[in-house]
Image (cartoon, grey):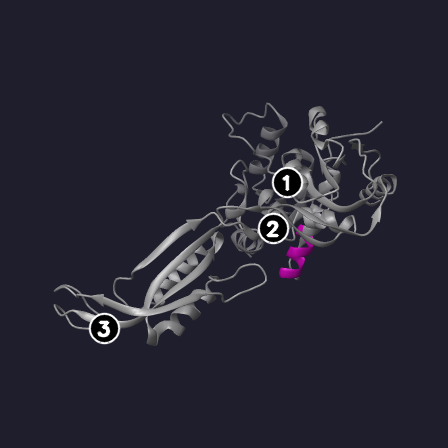
Amino acid sequence: MKINQIIQILEEWAPTTYAEDFDNVGLLVGDKNRSCTAALITHDVTVAVVEEAIANNCNLIVCFHPIIFKGLTSLTGKNYVEQTVLKAIGNKIAIYALHTALDNHEFGISYHLGQLLSLTKQRILIPQKNSLFHLTTYVPVSDKEKLLKALHDAGAGNLGNYSHCSFAIEGKGRFLPHENSTPAIGQKDKMTHVKEEQINVIIPKHVKNAVMSALKAAHPYETIAYELVAIENQHPNVGLGSIGELESPMDINSFLKLVKKNLKVPYIRHSKYEQTNIKTVAVLGGSGSFCIEAAKAQGADALVTADLKYHDFFKAEKGLLLVDAGHYETEQFTKRIIHEYLTKKIPNFAFTFSEENTNPVKYF
């Protein structure tokens, strides 16, 4: 199996098109066309993790956090990033990072964090904008079903819990084929009138190219009339964070004990909270100060995340319980999720679960 075949499976699951603009996801090191001997699944990549890959005869590391986040201006081994990359290159080991491509997945990191806290009725906290396109095209009535099938098979019309969505309006198309044309309907230099349907479909960003290829392949006309427009509608299945409900309301002490127990953290930091009970809970694995206002707007009683600064806790304004449970701790299950997905998709391939604890934070 080629490394690129594993990458294709990963990107069907967590398309890189949905990663945040600031992020650096995808294949960071290595040759995608090289045969893959085995793959090591890890949360972070360090020199120790690369050594673990070498010991397990793995020439691909699939990680959550990208080892190369900002551009490298040199590669001399002067810091842990360069040392890790050099060791991977020297041993012909490829590195692929998922990070916010998986963060933005409907059942990604935050969803699993919500599951650990026993949340029900989970939905995305901050749906992603600018991830949808609106396609309008015109086709003879006799070819409508064939074209719609091709568009739907390529992924058009999939939104939320629905698929094969479209809207059509019947009308009359007019065109004049010129001398060098090859019209599917009508004759050269003669005005043509055709009973057509205007077809409208929504296209998720990650299948745009496939849908446009399907349009061109299945449409009967030599020159296709269509409009493709990016829309600001939020994508209900793509976005950061999750929000859900506890089965029963909990007082603040009981809720904080639940977080500590289920996330197995030695301590947590939290804001002052003057309400009676916790019922609606927002979560975001990793750094989540940016979602405080979104949690408030969606009526959350608590937000469980990490990397909150001193002044972030003032933003709670006593009406939202802010809980900082640690960056690694709120993402600790990522390599298990990745490992379970890949072993299910390719059950007979060697995926090794990294034993290295890459949490850089220690507690005293």
Between 151 and 346, the one nearer to me in the picture: 151
Which region is colored magenta? 338-346
Residue 258's disc is none
Residue with the mark numbered 2: 105
Cα gap from disc 3 to disc 1, whole angstroms: 53 Å
Mark in front: 3 vs 1 = 1
Cα gap from disc 1 to disc 2, whole angstroms: 18 Å
Residue with the mark numbered 1: 294
Q: Is residue 113 left or right of residue 171?
A: right
Image quarter hosting the C terminus: top right
Q: Total of numbered circles in the picture?
A: 3
* SS of the residue under disc 2: loop
Q: Residues within 10 Å of mark 2 (few under 14, many from 20)?
A: many
Q: Residue at x 53, y 35 (%)?
A: 22
Above or below 11: residue 275: above
Q: Residue at x 53, y 47 (%)?
A: 18
Decide whether residue 204 is among the magenta residues.
no
Q: Amino acid at mark 3?
A: Ile
Q: Residue at x 60, y 30 (%)?
A: 81
